[in-house]
């Protein structure tokens, strides 16, 4: 488009211009304006359209950049081919006004003019203009498989061409280095030329997805590795140029055969370590046979030695007597004595909370490992000096079983959204579970506005819900047999320093089989009313 720069003068303001509307022109553009050199002359811009039916959408931007004096004014009309288009118009100081053509304009010659009013003491001002035309996208988009492939090729090689939008459309704006066929419902890529494009690495496997490719030129780059076999499976490939690269190995025999038959134009010269004859394949097979024999013999020897070692190990294990205490905990490496628990908690100096199975204390295993110690206290554990009734004995046995169950579960369950067991204490009247410390307490305190509570944003709430769901999903689907928590509530969802949610107290839940038709009936309802499945609460029945 011709601009009359020789009849304009430009000036710039250092003050910020308020965009003021939804079009948001750049501040750097709006800080600059043009006025006519001769104050009585209009500002004009024009263009000629080769197709008079083409519709143009014009957006003009104006902002007053000068603080006018009391006796000064700036007002003008905007005309289109001599007819009033908009006006009279007075620009607003440091605020953008957008003047546009909602229905578009058309014609062979189009001229916009800003004409000063007789009452105005200052000439018209003009800041910026945008002109759009409609593009015909009546054709279908390029085949999605080709689009995905070429986008991955672009990403792999970091192609710095005009590769934006649809690769094949509009037809007048094909991507540089591409050609397409348009004889189908959706255009397909048939030609790819990335010669002299600074490509490195191996020949990208995504090229195999361009199944209608007829010509591929990757010459004069720094490609390495072998010539891939997938190039032989491109059914329409007629020309392949791999010259002047750093390819190694041998050219696949199928490509050589197609070249000899004349169905493929093959160029692989100036790859110093690349062999392009049938003799390469023959030599390669002979060399491979020699190289395979020694590793095979060595592997057989190693297998025999491994079998002997396994037989010795099984024999020793078979002779070893079985453990008599089948109820003992599987691992002792994280077991603490009660005296150590006292030291960890500084004689139970700080209480973090209380629950149905005991009190939780704050502690340190060492200077850097902060923990929460749950001291389990059933009805009769500390009442050994008094006669125990049958009911008390039953409750104590139940408690011990629950303790054993929780430790065994926590020792084998590992997930980022479940509380981690650091250790445990398993002495006669002192049972303790030692967990990782959760710096932000439980979710309930934050939702109910407890002491030191944080107001959780919606993003944090969604993230906590997702974390809790992932923990439950692991208990239900990732554990074999699955674990049913039965007491999921906000006080059992703990938060780390970064507000990552972790589910607690799942070790006191029920483990049951999932064989076809299997279910489990319990005579003890475990969990908090209101958080239990109503059917389980009334029928004592769990099933997956």
Image (cartoon, rainbow, N blue to C red):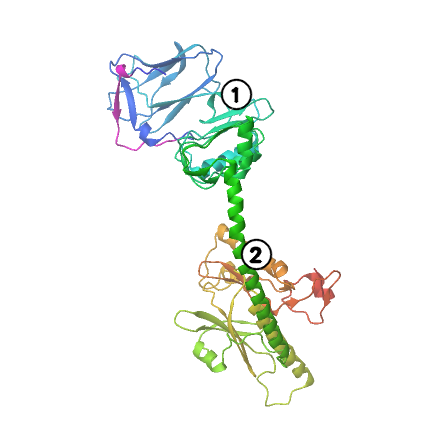
Asked if the magenta segment contains residue 125, the reply would be no
382, above or below 210, in the image: below
Question: For residue 228, which numbered disc appears in the image?
Answer: none
Residue 237 visible here:
no
Question: For residue 136, which numbered disc appears in the image?
Answer: 1
Mark 2, residues whose alpha carbon is within 10 Å: few (<14), some, or many (≥20)?
some
Is residue 294 rendered to the left or right of residue 515? left
Residue drawn at x 44%, y 61% as measured from the top left: 497
Q: Position of residue 244 (x, y in %)?
A: 40, 33
Mark 1, residues whose alpha carbon is within 10 Å: few (<14), some, or many (≥20)?
few
Q: Earlier in the sequence, mark 2 or mark 1?
A: 1
Q: Position of residue 313 (x, y in %)?
A: 59, 73
Camera-nearest residue between 411 and 101: 411
Residue drawn at x 50%, y 35% as measured from the top left: 277
195, above or below 283, in the image: above
Q: Which residues are magenta?
A: 5-20
For the C terminus, the image quarter is bottom right
Structural distance between the alpha carbons of marks 2 and 1: 48 Å
State the residue position of label 2: 470
Asked if the magenta segment contains residue 19, the reply would be yes
Q: Position of residue 507 (x, y in %)?
A: 59, 68
Figure quadrant of residue 530: bottom right
Camera-nearest residue between 86 and 309: 309
Camera-nearest residue between 57 and 312: 312
For the N terminus, the image quarter is top left
Residue 373 visible here:
yes
Q: Position of residue 181 (x, y in %)?
A: 55, 23
């Amino acid at each position: 488009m011709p601009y009359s720069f020789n009849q304009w003068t430009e000036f710039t303001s250092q003050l910020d211009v308020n965009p003021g509307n939804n079009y948001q022109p750049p501040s750097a553009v709006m800080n600059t304006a043009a006025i006519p050199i001769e104050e009585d002359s209009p500002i004009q811009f024009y263009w000629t359209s080769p197709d008079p039916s083409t519709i143009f959408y014009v957006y003009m931007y104006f902002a007053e950049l000068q603080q006018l004096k009391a006796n000064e004014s700036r007002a003008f009309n905007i005309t289109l081919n001599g007819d009033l288009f908009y006006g009279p118009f007075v620009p607003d100081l440091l605020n953008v006004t957008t003047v546009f053509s909602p229905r578009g304009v058309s014609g062979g010659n189009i001229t916009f003019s800003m004409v000063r009013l007789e009452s105005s003491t200052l000439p018209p001002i003009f800041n910026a203009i945008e002109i759009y035309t409609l593009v015909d996208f009546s054709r279908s988009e390029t085949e999605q498989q080709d689009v995905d492939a070429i986008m991955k090729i672009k990403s792999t090689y970091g192609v710095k061409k005009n590769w934006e939008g649809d690769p094949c459309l509009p037809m007048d704006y094909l991507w540089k280095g591409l050609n397409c066929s348009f004889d189908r419902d959706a255009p397909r890529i048939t030609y790819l030329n990335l010669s002299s494009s600074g490509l490195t690495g191996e020949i990208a496997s995504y090229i195999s997805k361009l199944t209608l490719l007829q010509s591929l030129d990757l010459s004069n780059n720094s490609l390495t590795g072998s010539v891939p076999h997938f190039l032989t499976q491109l059914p329409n490939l007629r020309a392949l140029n791999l010259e002047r690269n750093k390819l190694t190995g041998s050219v696949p025999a199928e490509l050589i055969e197609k070249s000899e038959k004349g169905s493929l134009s093959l160029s692989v010269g100036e790859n110093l370590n690349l062999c392009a004859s049938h003799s390469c394949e023959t030599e390669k097979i002979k060399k491979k046979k020699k190289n395979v024999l020694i590793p095979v013999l060595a592997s057989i020897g190693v297998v025999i030695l491994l079998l002997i070692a396994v037989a010795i190990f099984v024999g020793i294990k078979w002779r070893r007597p079985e453990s008599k205490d089948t109820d003992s905990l599987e691992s002792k490496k994280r077991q603490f004595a009660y005296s150590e628990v006292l030291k960890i908690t500084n004689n139970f100096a700080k209480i973090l909370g209380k629950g149905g199975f005991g009190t939780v204390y704050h502690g340190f295993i060492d200077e850097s490992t902060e923990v929460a110690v749950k001291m389990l206290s059933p009805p009769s554990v500390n009442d050994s000096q008094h006669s125990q009734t049958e009911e008390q004995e039953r409750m104590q046995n139940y408690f011990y079983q629950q303790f054993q169950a929780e430790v065994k579960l926590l020792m084998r369950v590992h997930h980022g959204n479940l509380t981690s067991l650091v250790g445990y204490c398993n002495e006669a009247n002192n049972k303790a579970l030692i967990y990782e410390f959760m710096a932000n307490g439980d979710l309930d305190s934050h939702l109910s506005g407890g002491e030191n509570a944080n107001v959780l944003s919606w993003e944090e709430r969604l993230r906590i819900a997702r974390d809790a769901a992932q923990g439950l999903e692991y208990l239900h689907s990732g554990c074999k047999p699955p674990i049913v928590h039965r007491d999921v509530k906000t006080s059992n969802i703990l938060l780390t320093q970064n507000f990552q949610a972790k589910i607690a107290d799942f070790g006191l839940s029920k483990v049951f089989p999932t064989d076809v038709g299997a279910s489990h009936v319990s005579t003890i309802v475990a969990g908090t009313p209101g958080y239990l499945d109503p059917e389980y609460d009334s029928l004592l029945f769990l099933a997956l």
